[in-house]
Image (tube, helix red, strand yellow):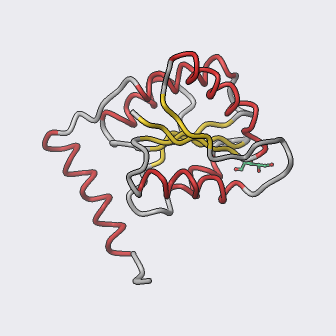
Amino acid sequence: MRLAVASDHGGFRLKTEIIKFFREKGIDFEDLGTYSEDSVDYPDYALAVAEAVAGGRFDLGVVCCGTGIGVSISANKVPGIRAALCHDTFSARMAREHNDANVIALGQRVIGSGLALEIVRAFLGSKFQGGGRHSRRVEKICGIEQKYSKKN
Ligand code: RB5
């Protein structure tokens, strides 16, 4: 499994903790920035992860900002991305099992890094259950994207 991870300045310290965790666990990842606590714009970093996951270069993505809200909203604008803002392990597991989420968003200013790492672990350790109703609902999400997608 190959992961893309990014944050803005507000999520930089949490991203650093997550990367440390990935290294310790031997998890294959790429850090798409930002690389310091200098102020940046969160949509740029959410977009980098979202495009990399939607394009198939990575299996899953992790995005962090101060609240997790800005990066989740931004990532979800990219067709094919289902970004879930999770601040508890149950939601992280459900996001994979029921929603087939392919990006998790976290807020550094909301939870501590210990809980955040448990949440990431729950997300990565869960799989889409598929089957009738869950697949049908995810297909309906794709249908909404198609309905509102603009031709470039
Ligand atoms: C940056 O100050 C902050 O607005 C950002 O990290 C994030 O919380 C936005 O949703």
Residue in view at x 54 percent, y 19 percent: 118
Residue 109's place in the image compared with 17, above or below, is below
Q: Where is residue 105 in the image (x, y as percent from the top left)?
A: 56, 41
The residue at the point 59 percent across, 20 percent down is 21
Residue furthest right in the image:
38
Who is closer to the viewer here, 150 or 91? Answer: 150
Q: Identify the image quadrant of residue 63.
A: top right
- At a point 42% along the width and 28% down the height, the residue shown is 124
Q: Which residue occupies the extreme left position in the image?
A: 132
Q: Is residue 13 left or right of residue 18?
A: right
**146 and 110: which is toward the camera:** 146
Left or right position of 37 against 65: right
**137 relative to 96 in the view: left or right:** left
| Residue 143 percent location from the top left of the image | 28, 65
Closest to the observer: 62 or 24? Answer: 24
Q: Considering the image in quadrants, where does the C terminus appear?
A: bottom left
Quarter holding residue 132 = top left
* Total numbered badges shown on the rendered structure: 0
Give the image quarter of residue 133: top left
Depth check: give the residue in front, 102 or 4. 4
x 48%, y 47%: residue: 83
**Up-down relation of residue 56 to residue 17 (above or below):** below
Residue 75 in the image, given as x and y percentages of width and height:
53, 55
Residue 69: x %, y % from top left: 63, 48
Quadrant where the N terminus is found in the figure:
top left
The single residue placed furthest to the bottom in the displayed view is 151
Q: Vertical placement of 65 versus 147: above or below?
A: above
54 sits to left or right of 100: right
